[in-house]
Amino acid sequence: MTIFKQYDSRWGKKNYNNSSSISAAACGPFAVANCIVEFNPSINPMDVVRYMQKHGYAVPNHGTAWSGIPAAMKAFGMEDVKNVNVDKSMDAVWKYMEKGYEAVFLFKGGSRGGVTWTLGGHYVAMVAYKVKNGKHYLRAKDSGGRDHDGFFAYETTMRGLIPQVWVGKKPSGTPKPAPQKVYPKCIDVSDHQGKIDWKKVKASGIDHAVIRAGYGKGNPDKWWKRNIEGAIAAGISHIDVYWFMYSYTKEMARNEGKYCVKACAPYKSHIKAVFADWEYDSMSYAKKKKVNPSKALITEMNRVFCEEVQAAGYKAGFYYNYDYKLNHINVKSLPYLHWYALYNLDDKQTDCYLQQYSSSGKVNGIKGKVDMNLYFGTEPGPAPKPTPTPKKKLKVDGIFGKESVKATQLWVGTAQDGICGKKTTKGVQKKVGLKGKDLDSIWGRKTTRALQIFLKNKGYNAPTTGVMDKKTVMAFQTFLNKEVLK
């Protein structure tokens, strides 16, 4: 029985909702994936994670919006997906599961029969059902760290802990695993590889290379001329170029862009794209010069380099890894090609131009190790347009989903994209009266309680527990309908 675990080292430390890791917050998409894998063994839980992120269901400081669960179940092939009302009885759930439906249960904090499912909120896949001695047993697949896997009796371990249940059935006819798409492999090289026999490289099946032109203040790579001319002569059809940067000011970065353009000029017709490469060695050099580059500065240095490259008629891009994406470069603000270093082939980042996946590749024609990449060729699209102002009133259902977030953004005056990010959160904090250090753009208990008090003072029926529960969301939706979506 395949059970996807959030804490798996392949993805556990990755960001989920801009406030927490997959290990801490992604039980929603993993519960869906643990259902889907029962009939589609080719499913990767990261596909469901990215679906939640793309559609605004990964909510900062909360995990996954309730509305994301049925949406993802449908998107990944389940049929007849329903939100079952369990306020008074679980009978409807049993009827569906008797017919072979699977389910995602939402648990609230608490323990029953010595079993603690969660201290807060947690989604768990239930993939089988049986009745024994008058009790209803469910086979759980728990993606969280408590590892509650196997059959559990509802009456002794779950009763009173389930506020929401979604059910769905397997599609008619079990789908065959999707054929794995083969992406071209690409090497990236510099003088570290020494003399390269490009004819042997070509004969080995490599038809794509990224070649270092140089580094820093106009320093050419020792093997630049020989490498690019050798690659061209051998018939390597796709050649990209990179420049390793040692800038610590915007002006230095702009000049490095000019140095790179000058080096590329004789071979312009053969070059597809040119990349900025500012990374750890660049950071160490800057610190030696008594400069500690901020995220904003590193982002701007990549930007001005790319501007120079683009102005010279090349496609421009930049290199980064997960640490830099999270802490050192505002990736989303740079409308250029992405060269992303992620050494995990189980998690192909097909939304980038290149994914570097190894530094220890072996290729005929190159002595020693060489960096390996997969070429996806994805180019940046136009900047997303703001979503139009909501015209219809919200359904008061207690689900803080995309439409509720858009209405909230209309209230606080941020872009209506349906994603509750830092700007939206800070806008809410200001609206509900938080000040000073409390304006931290983090939607935690303090922000929720301030919102609850704000709603209560306005005459709306909200608790003051600091928990964004169904009752609070319904009060907030009622407020937005009456005072914002007029």
Image: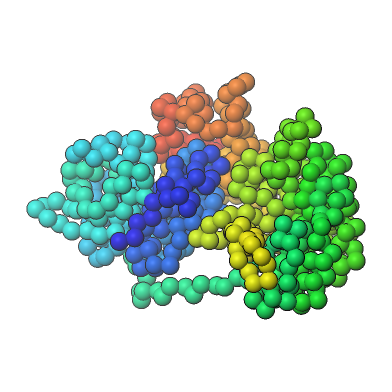
Question: Is 11 in front, or is 392?
Answer: 11
Left/right placement of residue 453 relative to residue 206 reads left
In the drawing, does residue 172 fall left or right of residue 96? Answer: right
Q: Residue at x 82, y 57 (%)?
A: 222
Q: Which residue is located at x 73 percent, y 72 percent?
A: 197
The picture places residue 395, in percent across and down from the top left corner, at 47, 47
Quarter of the image holding residue 411? top right
Image coords of residue 159 (percent x, y): 22, 42
Looking at the image, which is closer to me, 140 or 213? Answer: 213
Which quadrant holds the N terminus?
A: bottom left
The foreground one among 212 and 3 is 212
Q: Nearer the viewer, residue 384 or 458?
A: 384
Q: Residue at x 75, y 38 (%)?
A: 285
Above or below residue 111? Residue 58 is below
The extreme top residue here reads 436
Q: Position of residue 221 (x, y in %)?
A: 81, 56
Quadrant placement of the C terminus: top right
Colour pattern of the rendering: rainbow
Work out whether residue 337 can be spotted: no
